[in-house]
Amino acid sequence: MLSKTQYLELDKKIAPKSNEARTLFLSFVIGGLICMIGQGVSDLFKLAFPEMEEKMIGEITSTVMIFLGALLTGFGIYDRIGKHAGAGSIVPITGFANSVVSPAMEYRSEGVVFGVMCKMFVIAGPIIVSGVSSSILVGLVYWFVGLFQ
Amino acid sequence: MILTYLKVFVVGGAVCLIGQLLINLTKMTSAKILVTFLLLGVVLEAVGLFDAIKEFAGAGITIPITGFGSTLAKGAIDGVKERGIVGALTGGMRAAAAGLSAAIVFGFLVSLIFKARTKV
């Protein structure tokens, strides 16, 4: 029997050195490119609808990027990019879409309700819970501070 | 124009690079990475730094999940301004509704239409 530390040491020795420098470089390039695409989508809508308020442009941009992320995940392209790009494909909003679609597709065979609908939130759940809770906290603090001004 | 896109590329790339560094150094899973950057966005918005970064980097900071965090926090703050303490509860979700709804409906449709393929 191996202790946990022994196992981890052994694991370090045996595990293939995933070319860390390469992944770092690619995460930078792919992450940057995805953001540039987002900027392009936003600029296009600004050009097409000059009257539109900025908030709505932002909403449309997120929606388009999430749609693209979900679709590319459906075609199996996004996960292939992710294999090389690491965080470059996880951190952008397209990665959030990927984190919704990927488990949902994987568990499709367990049915629509318990497979797709439940597993959609395996990764997105923590994001929604922490995001909504922290936003409420921010709102409460802002309200409380406002009481004394 | 080119300079704008260069700034978007560099800042967006740098945010993702920091994420990859975290993965390399701490073996964080993607869920934890996403939550970390989301909370970073919430904090940056809450202390009022997000707008300055956004002014400089545009989509470089709004397309990463930090943008989603900022939307939530800004929504809660604006909610308080307009509707008092009730706005603190409702503002975040209201502001983030587009992103959340899009992720849910597109995610649902795509997973119904496409068949899972074996992981490459």
Image: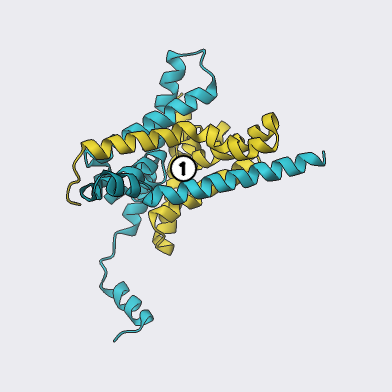
Chain colours: A cyan, B yellow
B47 or B77, which is in the foreground? B77
In the picture, measured across the screen, residue A116 lies left or right of residue B100, that is left
Indicate whether A5 appears above or below B54.
below
Residue B22 seen from this side:
yes
A15 or B38, which is in the foreground? B38
Percent position of residue A58, x then y:
48, 28
Q: Residue furthest right?
A: A148
Which residue sits at x=64%, y=44%?
A138
A84 horizontally vs B4: left or right: left
Residue A49 rendering spot, x and y as whole percentages: 46, 14
Tell me the crowding category of disc 1: few under 14, some 14 to 19, or many 20 or more residues within 10 angstroms, Cα based.
many
Q: Position of residue B3 (x, y in %)?
A: 47, 29
Q: Position of residue A85 (x, y in %)?
A: 32, 48
Q: Chain of mark 1?
A: B
Count of numbered circles in the view: 1
Residue in the picture at 31% in, 38% down: B108
Q: What kind of element bears circle 1?
A: loop
The kind of residue tagged 1 is Ile
Q: Nearer the viewer, residue A75 or B76?
A: B76
What residue sits 38% from the left and 32% below the top? A65
Residue at the image point whose x is 52% and y is 12% from the top: A51
> Looking at the rendering, in which quadrant would you find the N terminus of chain A?
bottom left
Residue A146, placed above or below residue A38: below
Res. A26 visible in picture: no
Residue B80 relative to residue A37: left or right: right
* Quadrant the C terminus of chain A occupies: top right
Per the image, the residue denoted by label 1 is: B65
- Residue A95 occupies quadrant: top left
